[in-house]
Image: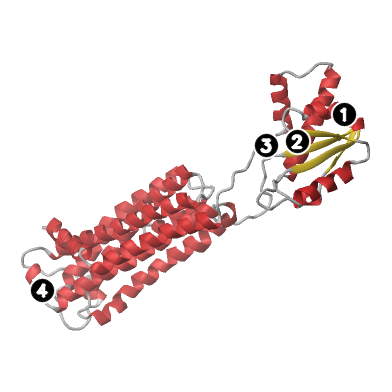
């Protein structure tokens, strides 16, 4: 019987033209956003800094012994001593005189000074470019290679050259010495977490609205009196929640998949596996959160007999959702490792909002994640039992709003 009720509620929403337009329209909007991001910020390939592209090196005559260090990988020009600055000016001027579509982005460098005290000349425009450091390192590596070969009195082997290059290109690991917001540290994770929160809130509002309106409509039209003669009130409420919930969750899944596709289409530099995992967990928390809040609102909707009175019974739950929502938006990024964040994110209802954000910005211990999920899933039957009691005690009471004392009272035998 529960399955039949759930199927009926799902079919009503699925056959609704308005719901189809919302699902397709929002899905298309999300995909278009990804395409727009791809157009506005096209992915740019970054060449290896150890071998920057299109480098032209001029070597003054007194530094001629270093020419061989660059001959195999770039253009090398011999120039008289003291002509480095003039050579740079001439090359840059010649490049600017080319047609814009034919001009290249060659980096011009000149090696001057004396052995042991080398000088590297380049233009101010090159110094301001992203490859300035790479170009300077490129010249420095050639100088070091030549000096090492002079000291050894032999040419470096390929293995020795690779070892030297590796030593000269040590990875720099930044160390955070001050407070940094989690938003700045992991903006992509924060965006994924925020998107999950918005989708959960959106799902609860849409789903509970459909559930509560259906409950009040059946009660006010007295159709429910016929229904409860063939099915127990709690099963009737369960069927409505499952049917409507399945439809709403299907909507969310479509939008989440579109959002994940939009992220990949946009070409943003994000770890695809990690983002995919975040989306999967976000979907799990949406399901858990939806059923926690939907059961409560569904049961409380039976306390009124008119659509106009729904706001009075729904407001406590809706405003109650704003507490974990704002905690997830503001507290979690500001204090991701605090004891308050950890404890609150384990509470059923709070965890559905706070855990997606904690996972998005990173740093959730596996045991906390597992404990929060177990507690949240275990709380659903408890919330369902509470909602079922309220529904059963209220659904056949017509007229004025049913008080919480009456709704939570002992069920009479005749019911």
Q: Is residue 296 visible?
A: no
Identify residue for label 3.
Answer: 171
Position of residue 343 in the picture relative to residue 61 (left or right): left
Instruction: State yes or no: discs 4 and 3 in contact (Cβ < 8 Å).
Output: no
User: Is tag 2's residue or tag 1's residue first in the polypeptide sequence?
Assistant: 1
How dense is the environment of label 2, judged by Cα within 10 Å: few (below 14), some, or many (20 and up)? some
Nearest-to-viewer mark from 1 and 3 = 1
Instruction: State yes or no: discs 2 and 1 in contact (Cβ < 8 Å).
Output: no
User: Is tag 4's residue or tag 3's residue first in the polypeptide sequence?
Assistant: 3
**Structural distance between the alpha carbons of marks 3 and 2:** 16 Å
**Secondary structure beneath disc 4?**
helix
Identify residue for label 1.
Answer: 64
The numbered dot on residue 138 is: 2
How dense is the environment of label 4, judged by Cα within 10 Å: few (below 14), some, or many (20 and up)? few
Residue 6 % position (x, y): 17, 59
User: Is tag 4's residue or tag 2's residue first in the polypeptide sequence?
Assistant: 2
How dense is the environment of label 3, judged by Cα within 10 Å: few (below 14), some, or many (20 and up)? few
- Which residue sits at x=70%, y=48%? 103
Which quadrant does the N terminus fall into?
Answer: bottom left
Above or below, 125 relative to 213: above
Residue 347, by quadrant, is bottom left
Residue 221, by quadrant, is bottom left
Which residue extends farthest top? 154
**Structural distance between the alpha carbons of marks 2 and 1:** 17 Å
- Which residue sits at x=34%, y=75%? 315
Position of residue 277 in the picture relative to residue 147 (left or right): left
User: Is tag 4's residue or tag 1's residue first in the polypeptide sequence?
Assistant: 1
Identify residue for label 4.
Answer: 223
Which quadrant does the C terminus fall into?
Answer: bottom left
């Amino acid at each position: 019987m529960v399955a039949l009720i759930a199927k009926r509620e799902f079919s009503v929403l699925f056959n609704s033209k308005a719901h189809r337009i919302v699902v397709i329209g929002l899905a298309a909007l999300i995909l278009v956003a990804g395409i727009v991001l791809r157009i506005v910020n096209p992915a740019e390939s970054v060449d290896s800094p150890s071998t920057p592209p299109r480098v032209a090196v001029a070597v003054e005559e007194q530094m001629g012994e270093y020419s061989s260090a660059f001959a195999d990988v770039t253009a090398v020009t011999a120039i008289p001593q003291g002509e480095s600055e003039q050579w740079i000016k001439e090359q840059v001027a010649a490049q600017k005189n080319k047609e814009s579509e034919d001009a290249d982005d060659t980096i011009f460098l000149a090696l001057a000074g004396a052995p042991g005290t080398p000088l590297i000349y380049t233009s101010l425009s090159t110094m301001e470019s992203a490859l300035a450091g790479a170009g300077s390192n490129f010249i420095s590596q050639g100088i070091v290679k030549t000096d090492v070969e002079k000291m050894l009195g032999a040419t470096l082997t390929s293995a020795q050259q690779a070892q030297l290059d590796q030593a000269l290109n040590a990875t720099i690991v930044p160390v955070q010495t001050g407070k940094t917001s989690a938003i700045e540290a992991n903006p992509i994770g924060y965006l994924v977490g925020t998107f999950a929160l918005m989708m959960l809130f959106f799902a609860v509002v849409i789903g509970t609205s459909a559930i509560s309106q259906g409950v009040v409509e059946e009660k006010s039209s007295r159709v429910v009196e016929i229904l409860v003669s063939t099915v127990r009130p709690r099963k009737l409420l369960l069927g409505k929640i499952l049917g409507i919930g399945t439809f709403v969750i299907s909507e969310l899944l479509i939008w989440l998949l579109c959002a994940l596709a939009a992220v990949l289409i946009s070409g943003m530099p994000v770890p695809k596996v990690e983002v995919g995992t975040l989306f999967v967990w976000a979907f799990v928390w949406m399901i858990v959160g939806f059923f926690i809040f939907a059961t409560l609102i569904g049961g409380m909707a039976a306390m009124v007999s008119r659509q106009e009175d729904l706001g009075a019974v729904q407001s406590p739950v809706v405003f109650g959702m704003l507490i974990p929502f704002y905690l997830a938006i503001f507290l979690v990024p500001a204090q991701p490792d605090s004891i308050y964040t950890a404890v609150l994110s384990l509470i059923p209802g709070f965890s559905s909002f706070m855990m997606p954000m904690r996972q998005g910005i990173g740093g959730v211990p596996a045991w906390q994640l597992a404990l929060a999920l177990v507690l949240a899933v275990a709380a659903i039957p408890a919330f369902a039992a509470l909602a079922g009691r309220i529904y059963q005690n209220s659904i056949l009471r017509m007229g004025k709003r049913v008080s919480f004392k009456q709704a939570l009272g002992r069920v009479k035998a005749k019911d």
